[in-house]
């Protein structure tokens, strides 16, 4: 049976017809499913209307303006907290993430309510080699910034988060609102003492003719990630004594 206080949260911006397929797949494996339409202009949010008429466990939140993935997630977290949910599995709207793995990730979260359950991508031949190799750089920085706290992959967005901790963390910083959300969320939650538990999950990169939609821009988004890691490293230096003390205490237990 689904854990009563866990939900699936799907942020979406101009995801096209693939959005309905993704949401329908998520509903096959978990209920409730919440979708945050982040200022979409392609009409994809309206495509959910027919599905909503038949699905009481589907809830749609609409933002007037596009604010980025992190902003959409935060909007969902605020409303989820108000409704008493304790955990949210965040997944992308573009069909890349494996809905069939939702129950396993939720079960892992139910066993460790204090942890974040992080998906580690298992790539197939559809994955662009440049992106597969490029993520190693971000992973290396995240490993350093957390003193090797066990973040299996810093960029993969198929994850279960504790709602209260992530919401509080995001509301204390003006960052984590766009493409940088996934990495910074994992690093900062690790700094807060939230343990990362890693589970493998397949990822598909769909071609346009398959309904694939990508908003990734190589130069723009890598510059954003670079700026993010510069900020995190500066703060890491200030936090280092506290992090080392926590690691020492943990090793004694």
Image: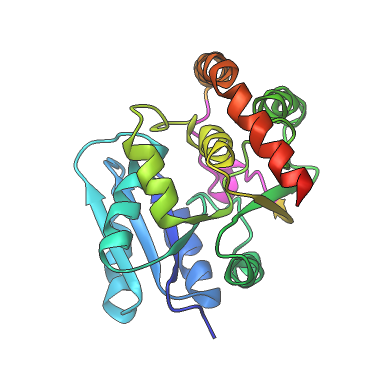
Counting from the top left corner in percent of width and height, residue 87 is at 46, 62
Counting from the top left corner in percent of width and height, residue 91 is at 52, 53
Say which residue appears at 56% left-offset and 59% top-offset.
Answer: 114
Above or below — where is 251 with respect to 111? above
Give the residue furthest to the right: 125
Residue sitting nearer the eye, 220 or 44: 220
Above or below — where is 158 with respect to 232? below
Residue sitting nearer the eye, 217 or 227: 227
Counting from the top left corner in percent of width and height, residue 39 is at 26, 41
Residue 8 belongs to magenta span: no
Is residue 123 in view from this perspective?
no
Give the residue furthest to the left: 64
Report whether 194 appears left or right of 27: right
Residue 208 belongs to magenta span: yes
Report whether 65 appears left or right of 210: left
Is residue 50 in view from this perspective?
yes
Say which residue appears at 42% left-offset and 65% top-offset.
Answer: 86
Specify the segment rendered in magenta: 203-216
Say which residue appears at 54% left-offset and 86% top-offset.
Answer: 1
Above or below — where is 20 with respect to 198? below
Instruction: Name the quadrant containing residue 97.
Output: bottom right
């Amino acid at each position: 049976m689904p854990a009563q206080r866990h939900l699936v949260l799907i942020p979406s911006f101009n995801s096209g017809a693939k959005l309905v397929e993704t949401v329908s797949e998520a509903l096959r494996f978990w209920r409730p499913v919440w979708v945050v339409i982040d200022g979409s202009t392609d009409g994809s949010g309206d495509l959910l209307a027919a599905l909503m008429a038949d699905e009481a466990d589907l809830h749609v939140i609409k933002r007037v303006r596009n604010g980025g993935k992190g902003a959409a997630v935060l909007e969902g977290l605020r409303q989820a907290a108000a409704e008493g949910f304790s955990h949210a599995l965040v997944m992308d709207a573009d069909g890349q993430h494996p809905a069939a793995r939702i129950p396993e990730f939720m079960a892992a979260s139910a066993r460790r309510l204090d942890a974040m359950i992080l998906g580690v991508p298992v790539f197939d031949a559809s994955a662009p080699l440049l992106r597969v190799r490029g993520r190693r750089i971000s992973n290396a920085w995240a490993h350093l910034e957390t003193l090797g706290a066990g973040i299996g992959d810093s960029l993969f967005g198929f994850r279960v988060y504790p709602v209260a901790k992530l919401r509080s963390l995001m509301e204390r910083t003006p960052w984590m609102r766009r493409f940088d959300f996934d990495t910074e969320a994992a690093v900062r939650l690790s700094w807060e003492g939230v343990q990362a538990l890693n589970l493998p999950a397949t990822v598909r990169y769909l071609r346009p003719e398959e309904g694939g939609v990508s908003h990734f821009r190589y130069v723009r988004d890598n510059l954003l990630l670079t700026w993010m890691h510069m900020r995190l490293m500066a703060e890491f230096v200030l936090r280092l004594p506290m992090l080392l003390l926590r690691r020492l205490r943990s090793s004694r237990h």
